[in-house]
Image (cartoon, grey):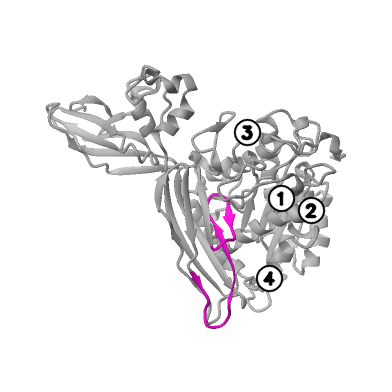
């Protein structure tokens, strides 16, 4: 099936009381609430909100933002108590901020916390000091006041307990929520309020810790209650992830006063990024195989984590992130000595369409000095694995880097990555954009159908990233004449790999030739493509051409 259109062209010149729910409100049958994780929504949306961890429906950081984060991370050095670089005895402060779930998962509940497993990992940089700044019973509103007792507790108690000062805190992990979120309105109101509070918390953190450079945000874990009156029920727990995404988007869009770059004015916030994505739809496995079962949460409220449940799962996912992410490895891992391990990770396939299952193999080998201890993977979508050979399913189109770090018993590490391109499918797009009845009727949802009556048939709508049931103006295929240069610009959905889009030109409507696109503006899943050429007096016709492959 080939579909196209063409245009002629001529020469144009306060205090909160927490009420913990009881077992009567819990529901261990709440194994599937029919919501996909934010990073696995694919081509669908949630109440009008696109999926993905970053703008444009993507799970990967924008390239320029990641490059900035890597540069910042490489500049993180051990600091003394006054904030002066001291590589011999200085410290790199890594601090958690949040409420009860955070302090439990990070440091305080049982033996499976992040603090315990990280400090017992021989690969940890000995200059990294891990501090717990999260406080039970203190949700987001309790942190928005710079002068609140929470901040004073962190400064006067929590940091000294970890052997560091405010000047040594350089990295923060933030996970927040609203207790009793129904009191803040339905979606999106409660999530928008949480977003604004998290942004203020991050500005407070930068003011409290002058050398703070990076902050990683995470989603909430899964709750096993949907009672609106409970502490943090579903789907509110899921919706917290959208608040975190909006915070990061504000920094990317230079809105709401979250500047981290001194070249752009006063620095009022750290560089922001997603850390691990923690939410799972109960016993429905994520692409990395992770599930959340009823025993992962306490039976007293079905929200707080159990020691062998969410505490252990979150701790391992955090450690996997810090050991593999390129904005963390340079400061989190110790310097290798001779004789360390090697790895040469490979993927069973490097390209395909959603849902794409890929088996990754570490191909790790011990070095001369010590046997292998563990392997940690992350997949640039907030998910992870600790198996040397692991299958992963990608549900959202994108270009992903599966990142691997293997560690031997001496703490020496080897790192590698594998790139996987995950495309969309026209039929998967149709299934999302049309009802079941419309999908079955090719006169409505077929490649050449045009249900919204604009100039773009469905297949072109797909390839261009448009909406098939919303009339799109012809100016989307934009033409311009300036200073003797004719330009033509149009959007392209980068992951429509089964429907490649080409621009063609003709002088007679009989013979068509491909035209080279000269410029590309990256907008995430979309890109704006442009052709420019000197204007002539010769009549030309242009068309966009696509076909299903």
Q: Determine the CA span between mark 2 and mark 1.
A: 9 Å
367 falls in the magenta region:
yes
Q: Residue at x 58, y 80 (%)?
A: 370
Q: Determine the CA span between mark 2 and mark 3.
A: 38 Å
Q: Magenta segment, which residues?
A: 364-388
Q: Is residue 75 visible?
A: no
- Residue contact at pointers 2 and 1, CB within 8 angstroms: yes
Name the residue carrying label 3.
34
Task: Judge depth for marks 4 and 1 and give the one in front.
Answer: 4
Q: Determine the CA span between mark 4 and mark 2.
A: 20 Å
Q: Determine the CA span between mark 4 and mark 1.
A: 22 Å
Name the residue carrying label 2.
151
Name the residue carrying label 1.
204
Of helix, strand and loop, which one carries label 3?
loop
Dot placed on the residue nearer the N-terminal end, 4 or 1? 4
Q: Is residue 412 above or below residue 501?
A: below
Q: Determine the CA span between mark 1 and mark 3.
A: 37 Å
């Amino acid at each position: 099936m080939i579909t196209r259109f063409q245009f002629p062209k001529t020469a144009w010149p306060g205090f909160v009381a927490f009420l913990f729910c009881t077992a009567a409100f819990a529901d261990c049958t709440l194994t599937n609430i029919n919501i996909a994780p934010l990073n696995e929504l694919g081509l669908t949306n949630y109440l009008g909100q696109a999926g993905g961890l970053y703008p444009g429906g993507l799970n990967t950081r924008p390239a320029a933002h990641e490059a900035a984060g890597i540069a910042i991370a490489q500049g993180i050095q051990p600091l003394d108590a006054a904030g002066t670089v001291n590589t011999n005895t200085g410290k790199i402060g890594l601090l958690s901020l949040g409420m009860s779930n955070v302090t439990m998962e990070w440091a305080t509940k049982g033996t499976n916390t992040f603090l315990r497993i990280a400090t017992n990992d021989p690969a940890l940089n000995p200059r990294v000091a891990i501090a717990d700044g999260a406080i039970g019973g203190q949700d987001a509103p309790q942190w928005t006041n710079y002068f609140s007792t929470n901040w004073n507790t962190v400064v006067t108690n929590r940091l000294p307990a970890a052997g560091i000062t405010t000047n040594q805190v350089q990295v923060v992990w933030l996970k927040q929520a609203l207790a009793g979120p129904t009191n803040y309105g339905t979606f999106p109101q409660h999530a928008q309020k949480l977003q604004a509070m998290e942004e203020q918390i991050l500005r407070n953190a930068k003011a409290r810790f002058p050398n703070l450079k990076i902050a990683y945000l995470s989603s909430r874990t899964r709750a096993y209650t949907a009672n609106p009156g409970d502490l943090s029920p579903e789907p509110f727990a899921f919706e917290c992830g959208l608040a975190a995404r909006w915070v990061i988007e504000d920094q990317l869009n230079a809105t709401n006063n979250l500047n981290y770059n001194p070249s752009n004015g006063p620095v009022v916030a750290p560089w922001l990024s997603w850390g691990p994505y923690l939410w799972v739809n109960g016993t429905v496995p994520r692409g990395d195989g992770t599930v959340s079962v009823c025993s992962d949460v306490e039976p007293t409220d079905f929200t707080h984590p159990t020691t062998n449940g969410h505490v252990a799962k979150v701790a391992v996912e955090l450690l996997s992130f810090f050991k593999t992410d390129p904005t963390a490895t340079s400061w989190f891992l110790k310097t290798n000595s001779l004789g360390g391990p090697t790895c040469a990770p490979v993927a069973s396939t490097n390209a395909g369409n959603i849902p794409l299952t890929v088996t990754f193999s570490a191909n790790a080998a011990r070095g001369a000095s010590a046997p292998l201890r563990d392997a940690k993977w992350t997949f640039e979508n907030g998910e992870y694995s600790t198996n040397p050979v692991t299958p992963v399913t990608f549900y959202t189109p994108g270009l992903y880097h599966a990142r691997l770090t293997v560690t031997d018993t001496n703490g020496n590490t080897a790192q590698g990555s594998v790139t996987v391109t995950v495309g969309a499918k026209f039929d998967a797009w149709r299934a999302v954009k049309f009802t079941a009845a419309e999908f079955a009727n090719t006169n409505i949802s077929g490649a050449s159908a045009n249900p919204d009556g604009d100039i773009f048939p469905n297949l072109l709508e797909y390839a261009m990233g448009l909406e098939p049931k919303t009339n799109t103006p012809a100016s989307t295929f934009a033409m311009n004449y300036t200073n003797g240069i004719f330009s033509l610009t149009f959007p392209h959905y980068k992951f429509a790999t089964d429907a490649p889009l080409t621009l063609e030109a003709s002088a007679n409507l009989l013979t068509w030739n491909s035209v080279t696109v000269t410029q590309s503006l990256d907008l995430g899943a979309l890109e704006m493509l442009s052709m420019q050429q000197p204007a002539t007096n010769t009549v030309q016709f242009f068309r966009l051409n696509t076909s299903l492959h």
